[in-house]
Amino acid sequence: MKEEFTDQMIELLKKKDRKAVQEIYELYSPVLLAICMRYFKRRDVALDAMHEGFMKALNSMGSFKNQGSFEGWLKRIVVNHCLDTLKKEKKYQHQEIEEFHAIQEDEVEDKTIDKKDINEKKIDVSFVRDAELTSSEIIEEIHKIPELYSIVFVLFVLEEFTHGQIAAQLGIDEEASRTRLTRARKMVKKALYKRSIAVLGK
Amino acid sequence: MDNKNMGNWEHELKNKLGDHKEATDSRDLDTFMDKLDNNDFFEPKGNNMSGVLAFLGGVLIAGAAIWMLNGENSNDLEPEISPVIETQTIKTPIIISKDMETVLEGADSVGVKETSMDEDTIPAEEYLVEEKIEETQKVKHDAKDKKDVGPISNSDNSEDEPKVLPALRKRIVIISTDTTVVADTTHVKHRTREKRKK
């Protein structure tokens, strides 16, 4: 139904029809903002990135050929814009920071959880399921890990990028992408487990 | 896509976050529309209209300018024709001021009656000479004959010259400005040197 609706809209968007732009915004902005929130902690920053990405998409409507999904095309443009914004801020390009965070993570001692439980193999994922964490809570936990890793995790798991694509986007080699993903997984799992225990404990 | 490496919990995570939506409100929409406006996204329609209007305005102005120039040129081409001024013979007596005694003599010969007014009684406004006095001096005929003779020539050989009316004979009005303006200076404070007290 959404696609049928957008087929009509696309022609109007190409003509830069004001009402069509408003309707498309109302339809896709919640989804696109949710995507941007994966990359930026603050809502206002995410909203700004979403607006910029949306504008880019509207300005390049001529290049959309009605062959694929309009929503997929729109999402990809917004994601790319988020990555460009992060690239400008150079938040994930410093290799030395990667090492620093890795060491820091290993040294973290959480007194609330037994070290044996933190072991990846022993973490029971069912806890996370049982805790019924909301999407916002999960995103919150992802943002708690260093951006260097969280971005790779988001791109690989949520956006379904390959390591090659991640490497190309972030300007790193594929091996670095794999390493970051491995560390990111551990961190995210741990963070979600902690949050689940906290929720279930209540 | 090498997502075969994804664990089950990651798949669950992806499904859950894939449906996630962050609510946006009308303020967000207004902000977005403002951004589009500021970036002239909706520009083309307005620009076309304003462009057409500007073009039409320019054409109108240019047309008006050309029309005005043409009008000026056509005026320039036409020869200047001065309007014909019909002169009138003066019949009224000429009032002459005090220092024009010599003129009075000439005026007698013309037949102009001198008004018997005292010098002092003549108001300042009447010190007017409405015609060149020289002309009145050179008239040798009586005032009655003046109408029959026609125009008066300045040259001595009046008979030789063709008697043609002058094309232009402007009236010259000389206004004497004998009135003196006396300013009231009672309000002016004069500087006085203060005598130093010894």
Image (spheres, rainbow, N blue to C red):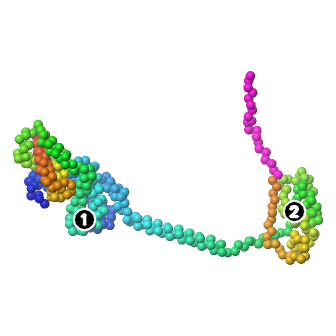
Is residue A11 left or right of A98 when viewed as pictured? right
Residue B150, quarter of picture: bottom right
Residue B96, quarter of picture: bottom right
Going by the numbered disc 1, the residue's amino acid type is Thr
**Badge 2 sits on which subunit?**
B
Question: Height in image: B72 above or below A163?
Answer: below
Q: State the image coordinates of residue B76 (x, y, percent, origin top left).
A: 65, 72
Image quarter where the N terminus of chain B lies is bottom left
Which region of the structure is painted magenta? B178-198
| Residue A162 forms part of the magenta stretch | no
Residue drawn at point x = 15 percent, y = 55 percent: A174
Is residue A160 left or right of B172 when viewed as pictured? left
Going by the numbered disc 2, the residue's amino acid type is Ile
Question: Height in image: A141 above or below A6?
Answer: above
Viewer can see residue A145:
no
Q: Magenta residues: mostly which secondary structure?
A: loop
In-front residue for pair A167/B30:
A167
How many numbered marks are there?
Answer: 2
Viewer can see residue B161:
yes
**Badge 1 sits on which subunit?**
A
In-front residue for pair B15/A184:
A184
> Secondary structure under badge 2?
helix
Question: Residue A6, labelled with which disc?
Answer: 1
Residue, disc 2: B133
**Marks 2 and 1, Cα distance to the nearest angstrom?**
102 Å
